[in-house]
Image (spheres, rainbow, N blue to C red):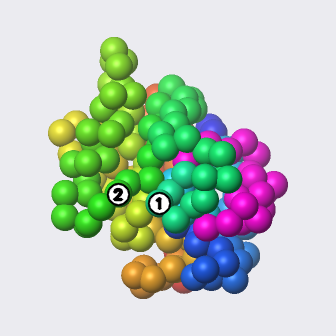
Amino acid sequence: MPRVAIISDTHVPTRADEVPSWVVDELGRADHTIHAGDFDSRKAYGRIESLANGLTAVRGNTDSPTIDLPRIATVEIGGVTFAVTHGSGSPTGWAQRVVETVGAESGDRDRDPVAVAGHTHEVVDETVDGTRILNPGSATGAAPADRTSMYVATVEDGEATVDLRTGTD
């Protein structure tokens, strides 16, 4: 069963000095890492890339264009397609905007992709219009988050089981 680390909004160095050690450990145990943007620096991106055993990442609204990442990316793992975007705008309507953004990526697939997005720093695992949306919060607890958080997904037979991890686990 592939293990997928799902993180976002690390904001290093503007809002945090480094990625917490427990998150680093989870990245090392994962078969693949998904990062939904807002690294904040080329150095932070390089650090995550060096820790990951395969990385799918997108650019967030605070990332410099020098971090050459797409605004949306997809990856298929164990029969599950993850469509990754950062998200944008106010928290009001955020989920619907994410669904609309990844909708173009779903094409003629038999099932909708799992949407992974960040931006709000709020943990989300909900289904909107048939699309499961995951927001892992902020891996560094960057405001307005009230804790450090991420998801770890295990994928088997085209199904993803998702567990929330926090710095208090």
- Of residues 79 and 12, the one nearer the viewer is 12
Q: Amino acid at mark 1?
A: Asn
Q: Residues within 10 Å of mark 1 (few under 14, many from 20)?
A: some
Q: Position of residue 143 (x, y in %)?
A: 45, 83
Query: Where in the figure is residue 36, as x and y percent of width and height?
Result: 51, 54
**Residue extent of the magenta highlight:** 40-58
Residue 109 spot, x, y in % from top left: 36, 18
CA gap between label 2 and label 1 equals: 7 Å
- Give the vertical position of 72 relative to 28 (above or below): above
Do we see residue 154 in this rendering? Answer: no
- The picture places residue 49, in percent across and down from the top left corner, at 75, 53
Q: Residue at x 55, y 48 (%)?
A: 58
Q: Residue at x 18, y 39 (%)?
A: 129
Q: How many marks?
A: 2
Marks 2 and 1 close (CB-CB < 8 Å): yes
Classify 10 Å Cα crowding around label 2: few (below 14), some (14-19), many (20 and above): some
Identify residue for label 2.
Answer: 88
In the rendered structure, the answer to whether residue 47 lies left or right of residue 96 reads right
Residue 52 located within the stretch drawn in magenta? yes
Q: Which mark is residue 61?
A: 1
Question: Which disc, if any, is residue 13?
Answer: none
Above or below, 54 against 30 in this view is above
Secondary element at image label 2? loop
Q: Is residue 36 left or right of residue 91?
A: right
